[in-house]
Amino acid sequence: MGTTAAEKQFIDRYVTPQREVQWAVYARQPENVYFSHAAHVKLAHLECSSCHRDHGQADTLRLYEEDRISGYSRDIWRDMKMDDCVACHRQRGIENSCLDCHK
Amino acid sequence: MKAKQYGMTIDIDRCTGCGACMVACAVENNVPPVPEGANDRKGITWIRVFPINNGAEWPGRQSAFVPVLCQQCGEHTPCVSVCPQQAVQVDPATGIVGQMPERCLGCRYCMAACPYHARYFNWWDPSWPAGMEKALNPDVAPRMRGVVEKCNFCHGRWHAAKQRAAARGQQEIDPADYVPACVEACPTGAIEFGDLNDSQSTVARTAGEDHSFRLLEKLGTDPKIHYRSKRDWVRRVAAAPGKEEAHG
Amino acid sequence: MKATRRDLFKFAAGGAAGLALTPMPWRLVTDTALWSENWPGIPRPARGEIRTRFTHCALCPAGCPVKARCVGDQPVSLRGLAGRPLCAFGLTGHHLPYHANRVSRGDPEGAAQAVRAALSRRGANESVAVLDLRPGRTASWTYRRAMGALPGGLYLAAQSGLPAIDLRAAKTILSFGVPVLDGWGTPANVLAARAQFRLIEAEAVESHTAMLADEWLPLREGSQDALASGIRHILTAGAAGIPSGEAAERSGLPEATIVAVAQELARGDAVVLAREETDAVTELNRMLGGRAIVRRREAPAPFHWTRTAAPVTRFDAVPDQSIRALLIDESVSDGYFPWDAVERKLAPEATVVVFASSRAGYGAHAGFVLPAAVYPEIADDIPAAIDSTAATFRLAVPLVEAPATVVNPTRFVAELAGVDAGDALRERANAIEQSGRGTVLSYTDSRSTPLRDIKADAFWKILHEGGCWEDEARDQSPGEPRASAPAVVAMTWEMRMARGPLSPLVTKLYQESNLRVRT
């Protein structure tokens, strides 16, 4: 059952007592944001790394850092704020209304 | 993609006053209930059905029910022109007047400006009985207190329709995928929804018919909700300024 | 230099001014605004893949098919099928497990003990009874079998041997306060048939049905019998009933109106509906002899059930003060008796056990209130609606797990009587399947298949995954126009709103608007 101490910790602390892990999501957006992967991947043919960083090539994950007051991850602040989405949309000439991305 | 103008036709002769549209709207959009003791002025009813009558006593008395929701005014909406935060916008691609509670600062100027009283204020944070928040609709975000909200033609379903189209590799949605909750819930089909720009659609055809009218047309708001009734007294009551009292 | 208060103020003012020139306050405001968007006061909907499950709505005998969209095990929205949308109650069904008035705790052991003690104390002329507020279910058969096994056992139903109303055979409907256009029968069918009948609504208040009816008769409160008798008098040319002049005076309606209504009813294919069945109404229906009141076959049941089951006893046939122990299944109710009518039948110091999911109702008067499951937690079949001329079998499938404290009423009663309730629904389905009658409609593919062509296992599967059975149509024999069963009150919107269980969103209909008035 597993090889590393981290895996043992996972089993002992979460799987056995049936507790949900408090996932720290790099890309967590506010509740009022609606994002469709289908539209961006299937229709616009975007690469994963254009919004998320290049996780796939790395052996270890970056440290998850969070803004103390707003609660958002530092990664959001780099390339996933609304301004960044709007900038990319404008660059590609895609008009959007507010409700297209907000719910 | 040709721009759409989503609109509705509401047949007052078919409305039974059951209120299913009111509750379906609240369920779909996570509209919170108000606390005990609050009245209809503090309530949030994105769509609200009003009982009306011709003012006569029996046996000449006739009654009807009129559902009123955001009339989705045309280009120059009263609410858009007064909002200091640009928290509401007319989407040129769909014609929907979209309210963004996340931008709203709660000044309620738009509520005063709306002649149809179709905008509602969150006087309280949403409060559900213990456990009921598990049953909320994940397609729509709940609002905090202090912001104004209103009908957005079920944009949660609009997103779902676009998602389904994108999964099929298409930009255009299938009209059957996008049906607002009130339209779906109406047992008599009194509320119909569609693209007013599409001459083939039911709403486009019936909107132009003889018995069709709009509320407070003289104000020039150019609403996209068209009402229909073969009864003259209904049109008379609907056009009368006394309707203000009925709106509460 | 001595630091004075004035220096302090100057320092503070200078500091504030300097701070305003730095980014700090603005960044703090931005971050705080972002935090406030997601502060704990706002609930977060569940996230996850949406799966669709089918069931039937158990809130009323219309039993509308339900398409539930679920995240994990939690339904997050309920919708009807195309052309058959759910009503305001059905749409909020998924809120009901959490409704504020929910009974969550009870004392089943204490209740069982008390009932057994009452049974041993039972006098020779006394009985132990189950009052079933939704007769016609498979659970009703279990109650009947249990009461058949107990000495002095009685099975009481809110209505007995109900005929069905065939709307297609009615040209005129005279309704005494029945909400025909407001939740009666199977609303989708009523509205579909609307153009074929003329509705005369006789009611003191201008209800929704009165507003939508072809004619409204605003008769005085309590004068239903006067009007019915007056009409009978006209139709029998004076042989029975009361003179129309007297009827007019007692009801407050013009005599000419009563005569016109009588003439219209005389033209044939008329039926009278009433919220409270009285002799006057029954006699009028018998006179009119319309084809709209028909006898409906019940869905087949296992033969050994029919042999051991107690007969259905009408409530008013029970002698006063003769019930030693009364068990009331209020977990689902389609009609109800006012408490004082029930109390009259109870022996002194009788034991009353109520199975309920809501505290409003009989719970206030019972010795024991045991928590029952609420739709969408229940596994039950739904009896046919009053306007259904053929028997139906459709299941309310549990979408959510009931809390652990919940008591299953049929199991409780069956255990008391030593009857094996076990797999009653499965046995019933098997009995129906063996009869080979009728058709099965499956919702996933909208296909209708004769039951003969479906095996037992497949039948059971379809019933659980979105489908229903309907008996074959046959020449309807006329039904009895309902013997009078006073004190039964059929459920209306107002009663549902008063008794619950209710989702708080239904306040949109009365508290947050003036669409309906809450009594």
Image (tube, rainbow, N blue to C red):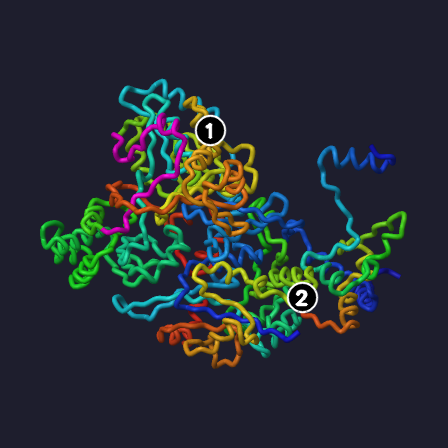
Hey, which quadrant is residue C364 in on the image? top left
Magenta-span inclusion, residue C285: no
Residue at the disc numbered 2: A100
Where is C229 relative to B160, above or below?
above
Where is C136 relative to C387, above or below?
above
Tell which of C116 and B200 is nearer to you.
B200
Answer few, some or many: residues within 10 Å of disc 2's Cα (few below 14, many 20 plus, some between 14 and 19). Answer: some
Where is B225 relative to C75, above or below?
below
The image position of residue C311, as x and y in percent, is: 31, 30
Say whether mark 2 and mark 1 are on the same chain: no
* Marks 1/2: CA–CA distance: 52 Å
**Along the horizontal axis of the image, is B154 left or right of C489?**
right
For residue C411, the mark is 1
Q: Residue at x 24, y 55 (%)?
A: C270
Q: Looking at the rendering, in which quadrant would you find the N terminus of chain C?
A: bottom right
Residue stretch in magenta: C290-319
The image position of residue B130, as x and y in percent, is: 57, 44
The image position of residue C279, as x and y in percent, is: 20, 44
Labels in figure, total: 2
